[in-house]
Amino acid sequence: MYISEIKIENFRAFGSGERAFVLPLNPGLTALVGENDAGKTAVIDALRYVLGTRDQEMVRVDVTDFHQPPGEERSNQIVIRLTFRGLTAADRGAFAEFLTYEDVGGQLSTALILTWVAKRSSKENTSRRVAPPEWRTGANGDGPLLDFGARSLLTATYLRPLRDAERAMSAGRGSRLSQILQHTKEIKDTGVPFKAETLAGLDPKTLSVLGLGDYASFLFGESEGITATRTKLNESYLAPLSFANDPLQARIGVSGHADDAIRLRQLLEKLEVALAPMADPESAHTRGLGSNNLLFMACELLLLAAESDGFPLLLIEEPEAHLHPQRQLRLMSFLQAQADKPRPDGQSIQIIVTTHSPNLASELPLSHLALIEGGRAFPLSEGKTKLSKSDYRFLERFLDVTKANLFFARAVLIVEGDAENILMPVIAKLLGRDFSEFGVSVVNVGGVGLGRYARVFMREDPVTDGEIGIPVACMTDMDVMPDNAPWIVGILKEGEDVPKRPPSRRQWRVKADFPEGGLEQRRKERTEKASGQRVQTFVADEWTLEFDLAYSGLLPQIWGASVLALDDDKIQEGKTTAIEVIKAAVPELKALREQKLDAATMAAHLYAKFEHEGASKAISAQYLAQRLEASFKDDPTGLRKRLPPYVLKAIAHVTVPFEDLPEDEAADAVEEAV
Amino acid sequence: MIELLGGAITEAEIQWAAALMGLGAAGFAPVGADDSRLRAMMNLDTGDYEACPGSGKTTLLVAKLAILAARWSPRQQGICVLSHTNAARNEIGDRLSASASAGALMRYPHFVGTIHSFVNEFLATPWLRSQGYPVRVIDTQITLSKRYAAIGWKWRNVMEKRNLSLSALTYNAADFTSDKRGNLSVHTDSYQAMLAACRETSQQGYFCFDEMFVWANELLDRNPGVAADLRRRFPLVFIDEAQDNSEAQSAILHRIFCAGEAPARRQRFGDSNQAIYATANQDGANTDPFPAAPTHSIPRSYRFPQAIADTVKGFGVMPQELVGAGPTGARIDSAPKPSAIFLFDDPSVQQVLPRYGAYLIEHFHESELAVGAFVAVAGVHEMEKDDNLPRAMGHYAPHYDAACARKESAPATLAQFLARARFEMEGVGNAHVLVNGLAAGMLRLGELLGQARASVGRKSAHRRMVEALEGEAALASYLKLVDLTLSVRGDFTAKAWADDAVPHVSEIADHFAGGQEVSDDVLAFVTWPDEVELVAGDVAYAPRTDNVFSYPHAEPKVHIRLGSIHSVKGETHTATLVLDTFFHAHHLNELKPWLLGARSGGLKIKAKGAPQLESTRLLGRLKLHYVAMTRPSHLLCVAMRRDAFTDDELDVLKGRGWSVIDCC
């Protein structure tokens, strides 16, 4: 069976009713992603409270665990409800008296619904602030209480964040390793016990682990040194201290507890596991934290996979801790393989991890991710998001590490190209909207699938599921050029006409292609590809980012950047300098200016640098970024007046709205733009 | 099964278990050629055990369970032990708890409980809850009165006119239809009104006991896999007192554990000669009746001596070759006494109990009188009419309160709750019985005042009471009441009740009532019975309302508990007096040939043709009195009318070892 739904009320940041936390889960592996303080750890802790953990560590409900809505009284009751589905025959037998039968399309299916309730005493000065929790069953929590024995079948394995694997794996009383080894079938069932009678001809290789321990104890007892010491202790020291009828006798030896299980435990507590460096297995140097972490997880999985009863749930907080990126990927695919592999008893391991690692997030299919945001859970599985089947296939292939950081952002700006990727953070910072301050991730999708990434953040059913509170802005080009531009940017030669469509299959468009509001229609279609909820697409007001920047008031800056980009190689090689390149470009710009062209035509001439002369948009963006930083460091208003409206809107969407410009400055801006 | 346990049960384990039961290591060892108990301990296969009265089958069952519990390692599979009454369940539970490992059987994943609670817990309530029916009260009485109130006066009139009893308001199918609504057609408005009342109260969470079987069977119909799941959970099933299984119980147990492929291992213990039912119209099981092959006999009684064995064995419908190895392990340590018959006529019927008391004082030492269990039982204990003396217990003991002795139904007053608790506490002294008796009474009070409460679940009544009052001022009152009850051991004088207890009871009642008016029913429930005024004259005994007859009245030396034969099933007494009563005819009178030794068993030997079973009614009389007469360890007495016997017959009785005592 597996946990198919977690519902948490009044626990830490999670409220109740509408504000309750609900997370549907699929079998296998689920990764909880989200920024800090979103509530990922609270989910894991909730599971630990309800199910208990195998390390036997007691977690006690604290008063601060009870949710306190801002400005209101702290709530008095935490309710955590887990719904288990996919029960095996053994599960149904084991939990027969606790089951709920659900009618799914005329077919009865069984579920185990467990409701954990902790109550807080509202009275002051009571010694016990939190009453012992109750484990109830039944769809409405009105069924019998879950017995301790039944609860113990549900115990989870929990790996804490920043665990000290070396300590967990080292020898000592109650060590985790001894606990794990004790339950390993091979340790218990291999070999024969040691018997002193069979000493002659004893082959130590045939002994069981406990047999070896007993053999060693036996040898200790026989050892000359120990016997002699004991005799001396008994005869010279204890004898004179004894009463005649009650002699004191010392025994020196390894613990000789009569119970096999206890002796085995004591023996295993003396063992430790360490990883040896490849070359020299006996080397005294230990491996680092990360490798030991892997070892620790391997041991826990060994135990979990070997068990033949109970519910195998593995909770890992930040499995990426201490691991470098490739190891993280190896670990994630290993965990997935473990989750997919059924145990002999028909159970599959369910794994829930929390992570801050884009590496891990990118390795997993989207359907295994759940975004935790603002005290709510947003599973990204099919049917829950606005993503189509083909979107899922696309994203599984293309959602890589760099893009995966969108899961950990407070706001996301999705752009189509390198130019936006480079320029937007710089522009935002100059406008006092520093993206790193606002936790905005810029994701560059490289010209394809802009809407698909955005739709990750759109819920299929926002009324019941709620909206993801992360603002997402998509920036895209309008891709319609002024009517005179085809000749300026060199798409058409002098004298050629704009080919008629059809039969022409040209991809580019001029404004004349869109008569009678067609332009607005195109803008609307582009916008609607990914808009709604907190997602908003911002379409370039005119044509493309470069064109629009030039058109709206940054022509000189971007002109300079484009010519620098054209000569970038030479500049880098030291054959020329930036200043010389700029100087050389001045006459061309001056000549154009003298023609008193309108702004659009001027911008089209600038765009020819990219379209016709082949300037790199990415490199010119870098030069432009430098220019902007130099020119507008202390002049946010000046920059703002020169920026295209859609750029400003996109920045406002992922940060905070801009205040209105003072009237005269607004007038200036309009004037300058015209 | 052997694999699950990791090997067969060994003799060493049996010796350990015998010692644990206080029988000594040889407790289950063969006696002579009789190794029936040892074989019963070893056997792990499906089988039925015919265990004679006093054979120690509960001890044997508990010993066997103790061994299995010590071996048990699966965490999600368990042993299922089913009994008929909560009393039997508690006995098994108390004895298992004596050993740490065996006590584990009382917890998950095992089940020890009544058949009803099993069906409720594992089938009916999960199914009902899943359909959104809360399960608040499973109690026929409460549920029927709720339905009767819900149905409206118009339809109540129809019921009255048509002579329909309250049972017309029960159902025996999940669509709330019933075959107990006379010849009303389903389409009539009155039938539909009854159906609607059933549906509505069920949706509110009120159910009659037997209706839980309806829902359990519906779940099995809808989801046959449940049976397989339960067999997986309980690969080993023990059923105690299997002879008492009704058809409904037997059928559903067969369906859950036996029918079809891969049945569970099932061992049933019982005594078909003791098959008596709580109500007269109840019949034994037709499905999977007890005993079924393979049947094993455990004929050795450790309760009574051979003399009693010889006297009673003929009363068995299928007489077992009883071996009387008792009395052993009895409350007292003296030789058994010869059986006695008390003869009386109309004027002297009330002298029977005093004479019995005197007879006991004569035959038992003072110390034995203090610790022994002395009982008088009657086949009929409710006085419905005043004719055909002796009709019922009431003719012998006018102050006998049948309601108080009835184990199966709820006591009618708070005083009766406490009286029953006092009885259950007798000889044990554990206070929890008393506290839970009080709490059960208070919960009942809550129900009468319209408080819904879950009658399911494993929490004790006291625990539920404390939870119900958590954070309320009434909690202090309740705890004070508990304290008072303990201090007088549940036995209030009328004055003490009125002065000390009633203020607390009222406070709790007010809390439950929540401002609504308290009805007469409620007042009657909490009223303490008046102490019966002694009738002037020479009444030589103290009438008591808790069905104990103490003798002599002035300075009681012996306390005789009065009850129905049903109420003493499974008990062992030092002495039992079986009183003749009337059901269509006088019971013992009808059984006179068996008493005189002229007849044995329930088969009629006809002049020609195969032997034939006696009428159902006569078989019923035989079983009932077999139960009654197999209770005593030391002394068996019966009381019959003097005019039932001729002098010759009395001589026959004397010749068979009976002492004849004439009370006339």
Image (spheres, grey):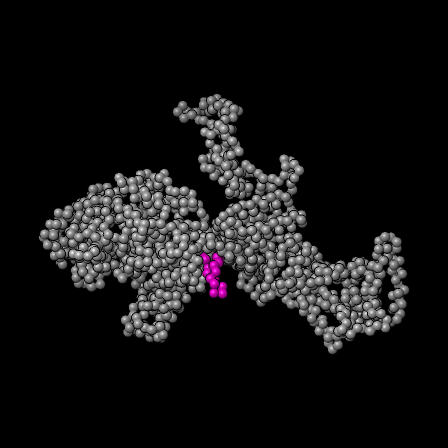
Locate residue A201 relative to residue B562 in the image: left or right: right
Q: What is the span of residues highlighted in magenta in the rendered image?
A: A97-113
Q: Residue at x 65, y 48 (%)?
A: A327
Locate residue A94 relative to residue B363 in the image: left or right: right
Locate residue B512 relative to residue B659 in the image: left or right: right
Query: Is residue B517 visible in this depiction of the protein?
Result: no
Q: Residue at x 12, y 50 (%)?
A: B652
| Pick the front one: B401 or A323 | A323
Query: Is residue B86 visible in this depiction of the protein?
Result: yes
User: Is residue A108 a member of the stretch shown in magenta?
Assistant: yes
Whole-percent x, y for residue B134 in the image: 42, 63
Locate residue B170 relative to residue A148 in the image: left or right: left
Q: Residue at x 19, y 57 (%)?
A: B609
Is residue B446 depicted above or below B302 in this figure? below
Residue A172 in which image quadrant: top right
| Quarter occupied by the C terminus of chain B | bottom left
Q: Residue furthest front?
A: B609
Dominant SS type (magenta): strand
Is residue B317 depicted above or below B196 in this figure? above
Whole-percent x, y for residue A345 in the image: 50, 50
| Pick the front one: A34 or B288 | B288
User: Is residue A318 a member of the stretch shown in magenta?
Assistant: no
| Pick the front one: A166 or A418 | A418
Residue B526 in which image quadrant: bottom left
Whole-percent x, y for residue A392 in the image: 63, 61
Whole-percent x, y for residue A418 in the image: 75, 59
Is residue A89 depicted above or below A524 in this figure? above
